[in-house]
Amino acid sequence: MRIAVCYNQTPKYSAHGEIRDRIADSGSYDQAKAVLQALHQLGHQPELIPLADKLSDFLPRLENFAPTLAFNLCEGFWGDSHQEMNVAGIFELLGIPYTGSQPLCLGLTQNKLQTKTLLLQHDLPTPKFCLALPGADFPNTDGLHYPLIVKPAYEDASQGIEPASVVDTLQQLKQRIRLIHKGYRQPALVEEFIDGRELNVAIIGDGSLTVLPVAEITFAADLPRAMVCFDSKWSPQSAAYLGTLPVCPAEISAAETSLVTTAALRAFKLLDCRDYARIDIRLRNQTPYILEVNANPDISPDAGLARAAGVAGLAYPQLIEQILACASERKDLHHEKPASI
């Protein structure tokens, strides 16, 4: 098949956030190169097609290549992760079958408030929270118990999260909220910080779903907080990165495995994820608190989802092949002729 491997390029400077956030933004290209290589190994005809600052450049390249389908690795548009859902919408409008979740799912899962609200409405555990809006009165936090963690409401890749994001006093909370408002120009999500085991559940498939082996993120005892922050993911020389180690499969009981995988599957289906997703959970007192539903996680060979697939016996090209098969099946169904009446 002719496969357009689409990824987003990023500007040198962003209108919001921190300069270092570009490290995470550039990960789309690394994924694209790995997927391209895997598709070559599988015998397909892939081509890298970057999305930069102009749709007028992207669309002709896509049209000229005339792909059978697109492998969508775009995580935003020119440094704006809020546009992730709209990039998937481009493929929808063009009628090009593509891998990954649909626009509504991508939009909902990036909006942490909407995700958590839906989870609670369906009796899925998530940490207690409130939202601090820029320019509004300070939120009522009477129902929340310290320590609390403060995050940008609409970012991913742990952008805006560092050890100081976890606060123990009202003064620290107010200071952290101001930093999010000023730096990221968006609401701040304030959550109870769950002191428990951090587990990742990766799921692949569309309709028929496969839960990959559960992974645990372990933390060195000398870290200021047992948490995944920006440096844990993107700064290889930092203490946070070196002290944050994945273990797959996680050393948890069969009962605990059932708890977290059941919660993850329910969340995957509730948010209408497809092809692949990762659900991040904190397990405390036998309660699987869902921290995030990542409908467009990193699928680089050294990332958590591919690592879990490897433990399950799926080599990287096989993982890519399974994701591709989901999109191909949708393509075939979409083009099936309706039954005669």
Image (tube, helix red, strand yellow):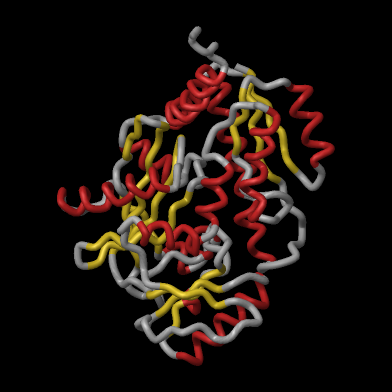
**337 and 139: which is toward the camera:** 337
Residue 195 image position (x, y, % from top left): 31, 72
| Rendered view: 239 above or below 8 | below
Residue 217 shows in the view: no
| Rendered view: 63 above or below 87 | above
Extreme-front residue of the structure: 341
Residue 96 image position (x, y, % from top left): 65, 27
User: Residue at 74% across / 62% down in the picture?
Assistant: 14
**316 and 142: which is toward the camera:** 142
Instruction: Name the image quarter holding residue 74.
Output: top right
Extreme-right residue of the structure: 56
Left or right: 213 as drawn, with respect to 242? left
**277 and 112: which is toward the camera:** 112
Instruction: Name the image quarter holding residue 12.
Output: bottom right
Residue 270 image position (x, y, % from top left): 40, 47
Residue 169 image position (x, y, % from top left): 43, 90
| Rendered view: 69 above or below 115 | above
User: Residue at 64% across / 53% down in the picture?
Assistant: 25
Residue 175 shows in the view: yes
| Rendered view: 306 above or below 253 | above
Left or right: 276 as drawn, with respect to 226? right
User: Residue at 65% across / 39% down in the picture?
Assistant: 89
User: Residue at 61% across / 24% down in the picture?
Assistant: 69
